[in-house]
Amino acid sequence: MPLFTKKPGKKEATDANHQNGDSSETTKQSVTNKTNSSSDSTGGDSSIGRPKLVFHCQQAQGSPTGLISGFSNVRELYQKIAECYDFPSEDILFCTLNTHKVDMTKLLGGQIGLDDFIFVHRKGQPKEIEITKTADALGLTITDNGAGYAFIKRIKEGSVIDTMKHIQVGDHIEKINDERLVGRRHFEVAKLLKEIPRDSTFIIRLIEPLKDGFINVGPKGDSRKNKKANYGTGKETLRFNSNGKAEIRIQVRQAVKISTEL
């Protein structure tokens, strides 16, 4: 599915708070470097002279740097990354920009700077936790990656889930009891959790991001100038419109968030 940035003000781009205090949140993910090129009637390519857009990528747990290009939505991005590192695209939970950490403020969102560095977070250890819903709100904010995986974006301090240290930000919610949730959107998962009666017990199956020693952290600084390299400024951005056309804008990147409180 294409994941283009939508203008603020629409329902999808605002926070909708529900009464029980949990939430479901999607940070839309649309990155691409496909330029719109066309050939004239004589076979000439109008894109001649345009630079090919290539993004640098690493696996968050540590890997060599890969070069990624030729994608127009998040599913194609995942496929390109999977081909680069020779693993199934279904292994990818989400991507962050300019940090290998599970930092939900750095999720790959509605746009990507041309000099941003992509870190891919893969599936790690699965785990099942039995939870008794002792309050109306579990204290979760849920997002999805735009490719079928819902995961935990925030945990409210002092909430039911906050007392369970095995549940962490970044965990993919694969099942609730026997109901498989792969392919569900964030609001569907939130609805299922909201509808669980208070004081009842359920089992949630999670898959945490792969954790390992991190190596090869992005580009090196210029030792001659004693300067540390920055990953991305966000000022020059490749952005995609709902009509599928791409354009480069000079602006400061702002996060686009959609959330639904449970």
Image (cartoon, rainbow, N blue to C red):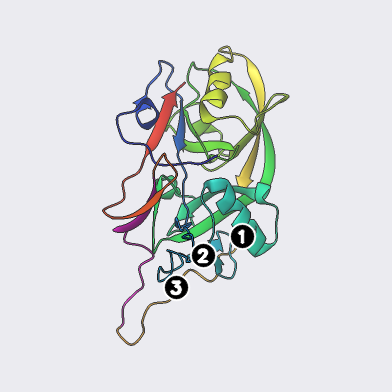
Q: Residue at x 41, y 48 (%)?
A: 245
The picture places residue 138, in percent across and down from the top left corner, at: 50, 24
Identify the residue at image location x=37%, y=21%.
17
Between marks 3 and 1, how big is the CA–CA gap? 20 Å
- Residue kind at label 1, given as amino acid type: Asp
Horizontal side of 193 relative to 226 (left or right) equals right
**Sequence order check: which comes first, mark 3 or mark 2?**
2
CB contact under 8 Å: marks 3 and 2 = no
**Residue range corresponding to the magenta coloring:** 226-240
Q: Position of residue 133 (x, y in %)?
A: 57, 19
Judge depth for marks 3 and 2 and give the one in front: 2
Kind of residue at badge 3: Pro
Residue at the extreme left of the image, as rendered:
251
Point out which mark residue 212 bears. 1
Choose the circle earlier in sequence order: 1 or 2.
2
Depth check: 160 or 98 in front? Answer: 98
SS type, badge 2: loop
Q: Is residue 162 magenta?
A: no
Please tell me whether residue 248 is drawn above or below residue 259 in the rendered image: below
Query: Circle 3 sits on which residue?
Result: 219
Q: Main secondary structure of the magenta part?
A: loop
Residue 236 on the magenta segment: yes
Against 232, residue 28 (above or below) is above
Q: How far, Cα to Cα, is label 1 from label 2?
A: 50 Å
Distance from disc 3 to disc 2, alpha carbons, whole Å, reads 39 Å
Tell me the SS state at disc 1: loop
- 91 shown above or below 182: below
Q: Secondary structure at mark 3?
A: loop
